[in-house]
Image (cartoon, grey):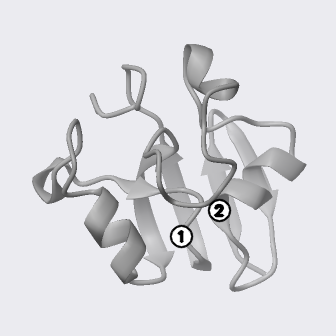
Amino acid sequence: MPTVSYQGEEIECEKGAILRDVLREAGLSVYNGRSEQLNCRGMGSCGTCAVQVDGEVSDPGKKEAARLWAPPHHPSHDVRLACQVRVEGDVEVTKGRGFFGQHI
């Protein structure tokens, strides 16, 4: 089973699980400040669950890639949307500063 490392916690999950769901089930949030309430609930449209992910995860789909082209994100920022990422192996997750978590 893959292990997700986030904020000093290590969570085991099923291969293919959605990263946002894994963290939420462990009582951890991928949101900063008011984005905890003001988000798209995992639909991939708001961009507030952006995190840096190091490890084995799915490739970005069309929806995620499109959202990461919209400000304040950009593909060069090296972030992924937790609601769109599938965990394929062990990963380390980092949340940046800012409403969207875009400042890694």
Q: Give the SS element for disc 1.
A: loop
Q: Nearer the viewer, residue 69 or 94?
A: 69
On the rendered image, what quadrant is the C terminus found in? top left
Q: Position of residue 24 (x, y in %)?
A: 80, 46
**Extreme-top residue of the structure:** 33
Circles 1 and 2: CB distance less than 8 Å? yes
Residue 52 position (above or below residue 97): below
Asked whether residue 41 is in view, the answer is: yes
- In the displayed structure, 54 sits above or below 88; it is above
The image's mark for residue 46 is none
Residue drawn at x 53%, y 70% as measured from the top left: 85
Q: In this rendering, does residue 60 appear at all? A: no
19 left or right of 46? right
Residue at x 43% of width, y 46% of height: 47
Position of the N terminus, as image quadrant, is: bottom right
Give, as a three-letter code, the residue at label 1. Val
Q: Say which residue appears at 28% left-offset and 67% top-offset.
A: 66
Q: Which residue is mark 2?
A: 19
Residue 84, by quadrant, is bottom right
Q: Residue 71 versus residue 50: which sits nearer the camera?
A: 71
Name the residue located 70 percent from the left edge and 25 percent from the top edge: 37
Distance from the alpha carbon under mark 1 to that under mark 2 = 6 Å
Percent from the top left, x then y, of residue 95?
47, 35
First-in-chain label (1 vs 2): 2
**Residue named by callout 1:** 85
Q: Residues within 10 Å of mark 1 (few under 14, many from 20)?
A: many
**Nearer to us in this view, 99 or 1:** 99
Q: Hey, what amino acid is under mark 2? A: Leu
Residue 16 percent coordinates (x, y):
69, 85
The x and y percentages for residue 6 are 62, 43
Dot 2 alpha-carbon crowd within 10 angstroms: few under 14, some 14 to 19, many 20 or more: many
